[in-house]
Image (spheres, rainbow, N blue to C red):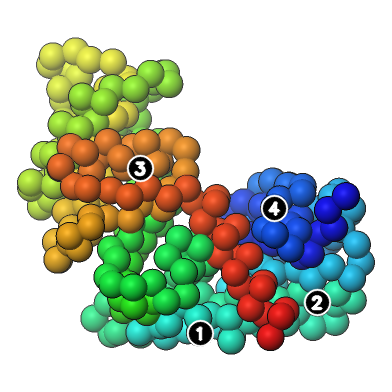
Amino acid sequence: MTEPAYVAVDWGTSSFRLWLVDRGGRVLAERRSDEGMLAAAKTGFPAVLQSHLAAVEAPDHLPVLVCGMAGAKTGWVEAGYVDTPAPLAAILKQAVRVPAQARDIRILPGIAQRDVSAPDVMRGEETQLLGALGFEAAGEALVCMPGTHSKWVRVKGGIVEGFSTFMTGELFSVVSRETILSLAVAGADEAEDVASFKAAVKAAHAAPAFAANLLFTARSRQLLFGGTPAAARETLSGTLIGVELAAGLSGAVPQAGVTLIASGRLAMLYRHAFDALSVTVHPVDADEAVRRGLSMASAAIWTT
C-alpha cells in the first residue's frame, strides 16, 4: 500500500480543499468543504484542519502545506507577500511555519504588487502559477485565472513581473441578484446560450466604456424582443467577461497565446470568450495546477 508523504491544502475565502498525497504526487484521499477562511475564523483553523486530517486518517507525523487565504492578515497565521518582480521559487523560501502545532504545518506567502498606481495582491493563485508554469518557465506567459476575483498575470523566465485583479465573478453575483437585472435572469435554467454569450463578449470587448449600457440590454432586449432568462444571464456574464478581456488583452499577447488556468463552468465560459475573439488559449485545469504547485513546493521545502 502506498504511504502518504504530506497533506496539501488550498484554503480559500469560502472554500477548503485537502489532499492526502504520496511521494509520487498521487492523491490518496480528498476532502472538500465550505469551511474557508471566513468560516474557519469563527470555528478555529486548527479545529477545521484537524477534522479533515482525521477524516483521511493522516498520520500524526505527516507535514501539511497550505496555500491561500489561511495566510492572510485575517487568516490563521499571516504569511506575508513576495514582492513583484517575484521569482516563483522565492515563494518557497518565505513559507511560514504555524507555531504551537504538534505537526509541521507551513503556509505559503502570496504575491504583492507595491505600485502606488496599480497596487494588487494575490493568495493561492501563486501556487497555481507554480504548478502550471514551473519554477523557471522559459519565455513569456500571459496567464488568465478566472474566479470571483480574476487574475491576469505576466510571467517571464519564472518571474511574476506584474498582475491585475478583476472583480468579474463578484460583480456578476451582485448585478444578477441585487439590481433590476435580477428580473431578467429570474428562473434561468442551466441551458447554455453560447450565441448570446459570445455576442456580449464581442460587444463589451469592442466598447468596454459602454459596459453599464451593455449590461442593461439584458433587460431591454428581453422586454422588447423576447428571450429566455438564460440568454439574459449569458449576456450579463459575457459583458463582464468581455470587459475583463478588453483590459487583459490590451498589452502585448505572447505569440503562443494565453494560458488559461480554470476549472468547471468558468473554464468553459472563458474558452468560449477567447474563441469569440479568435485568441489562442492553452487550458490548464485549476485543481491540477494547485495540486502540482503544492507538490513542487512540498518537495522543495522538506527535501532541502
Residue holding disc 4? 26
Disc 3/disc 1 C-alpha distance (Å) = 34 Å
Q: Which residue is the extreme one toward the left? A: 206
Residue holding disc 1? 90
> Is the Cβ of the residue at disc 3 closer than 8 Å to that at disc 1?
no
> Mark 2 or mark 1: which comes first in sequence?
1
Q: Does residue 115 show up?
A: yes
> Mark 2 or mark 3: which comes first in sequence?
2
Disc 2/disc 1 C-alpha distance (Å) = 20 Å
Query: In the figure, 87 relative to 294: above or below?
Result: below
**The disc labelled 1 sits on which kind of residue?**
Ala
Q: Residue at x 73, y 47 (%)?
A: 30
Residue 104: which numbered mark, if any?
2
Of labels 2 and 3, the one closer to you? 2
Please state the horizontal and vertical placement of residue 190, each as a whole percent of the image. Answer: 43, 21
> Is the Cβ of the residue at disc 4 closer than 8 Å to that at disc 2?
no
> Mark 4 or mark 2: which comes first in sequence?
4
Bin the neighbour count of mark 1 within 10 Å (Cα to Cα): few under 14, some 14-19, many 20 and up. Answer: some
Query: Which type of secondary structure does the marked residue at label 2 adopt?
Result: loop
Q: Residue at x 63, y 65 (%)?
A: 295
**The disc labelled 4 sits on which kind of residue?**
Arg
